[in-house]
Image: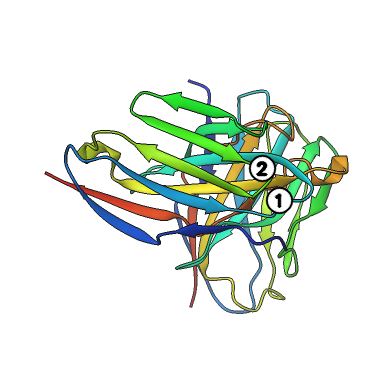
């Protein structure tokens, strides 16, 4: 089955630690995205990548980093510089930057 | 950051009733308007991608219209069923440069609860 997987589903982190969220897709999509959801707010774009080895900052990139070394993978690292990292993180992909996006199941990150 | 607003924030509908809700977005530099349905414990799922002023799209009992000149889109649910209960998200993409492609600005969503 084609789709997007994110792991883990739940993640706990101690303050001051970096943590990496995994996102993999087997849809052969060129574009991939990371969003963050906080209660009462819409999804906010953290980073996106329209093609392998290229990515751009979204609206709230500070304290996050990404890589796009393979077409199917777009991991997100939440660094200790992110001041309020507790949130629900969604990964998505699309065939191109203008098409509908397909979403993974999400990772809920809690900083203790 | 562009402002995409959805109203109402939530609504309760009796099974069988029809309902509609709004997404407003900047009317300048429009490229596309997306609608997604997000059911509890599932991933958001695309309903429509609309690009032309006057566009009307339909999927089953759900339909959407688009007015890019005044900056709004309506989503309609006809004869609501309990399985329509979800949060409906709209998202706007501006045009202009290739860097803006794929940069969806999401509204906060309209939560729909359909009661039997």
Mark 2 neighbour class, 10 Å CA radius: few under 14, some 14 to 19, many 20 or more? many
Residue B39 visible in rendering: yes
Q: Quadrant of residue A59?
A: bottom right
Mark 1 chain: B
Residue A103: where, in percent of width, then height? Answer: 53, 40
The number of discs equals 2
Q: Quadrant of residue A14?
A: bottom right
Left or right of residue A74, residue B111 in this image: left
Left or right of residue A100, residue B1 in this image: right
Which of the marked residues, 2 or 1, is nearer the chain's N terminus?
Answer: 1
Q: What quarter of the picture does the N terminus of chain B occupy?
A: bottom right
Left or right of residue A20, residue B62 in this image: left
- Find numbered disc 2 in the image and state the secondary structure of the residue it sits on: loop
Q: Looking at the image, which residue is at 52% across and 36% down? A: B65
Mark 2 chain: B
In space, the residues marked 2 and 1 are separated at their CA atoms by 6 Å
- Tag of residue B68: 2
Labels 2 & 1 near each other (Cβ < 8 A): yes
Q: Is residue B21 above or below residue A101?
A: below
Mark 1 neighbour class, 10 Å CA radius: few under 14, some 14 to 19, many 20 or more? some
Front residue of A18/A35: it is A35
Residue A28: where, in percent of width, then height? Answer: 67, 23
Q: Looking at the image, which residue is at 49% across and 57% down? A: B6
- Tag of residue B27: 1
- Tag of residue A63: none
Q: Looking at the image, which residue is at 30% across and 33% down? A: B78
């Amino acid at each position: 089955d084609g789709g997007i997987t994110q792991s883990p589903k739940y993640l706990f982190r101690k303050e001051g630690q970096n943590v990496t969220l995994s996102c993999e897709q087997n849809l052969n999509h060129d574009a991939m995205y990371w969003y963050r959801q906080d209660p009462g707010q819409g999804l906010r774009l953290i980073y996106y990548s329209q093609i392998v080895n290229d990515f751009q900052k979204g609206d709230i990139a500070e304290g996050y980093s990404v890589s796009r070394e393979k077409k199917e993978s777009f991991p997100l690292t939440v660094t200790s510089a992110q001041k309020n990292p507790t949130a629900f993180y969604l990964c998505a992909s699309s065939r191109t930057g203008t098409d509908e996006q397909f979403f993974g199941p999400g990772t809920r990150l809690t900083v203790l | 950051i562009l402002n995409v607003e959805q109203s109402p924030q939530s609504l309760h509908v009796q099974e069988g009733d029809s309902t509609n809700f709004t997404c407003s977005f900047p009317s300048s530099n429009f490229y596309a308007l997306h609608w997604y349905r997000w059911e509890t414990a599932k991933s958001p799922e695309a309903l429509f991608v609309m690009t032309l002023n006057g566009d009307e799209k339909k999927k089953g009992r759900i339909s959407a219209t688009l007015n890019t000149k005044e900056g709004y889109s309506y989503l309609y649910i006809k004869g609501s069923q309990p399985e329509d209960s979800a949060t409906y998200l709209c998202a706007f993409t501006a045009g202009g440069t290739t860097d803006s492609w794929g940069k969806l600005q999401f509204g906060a969503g309209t939560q729909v609860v359909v009661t039997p």
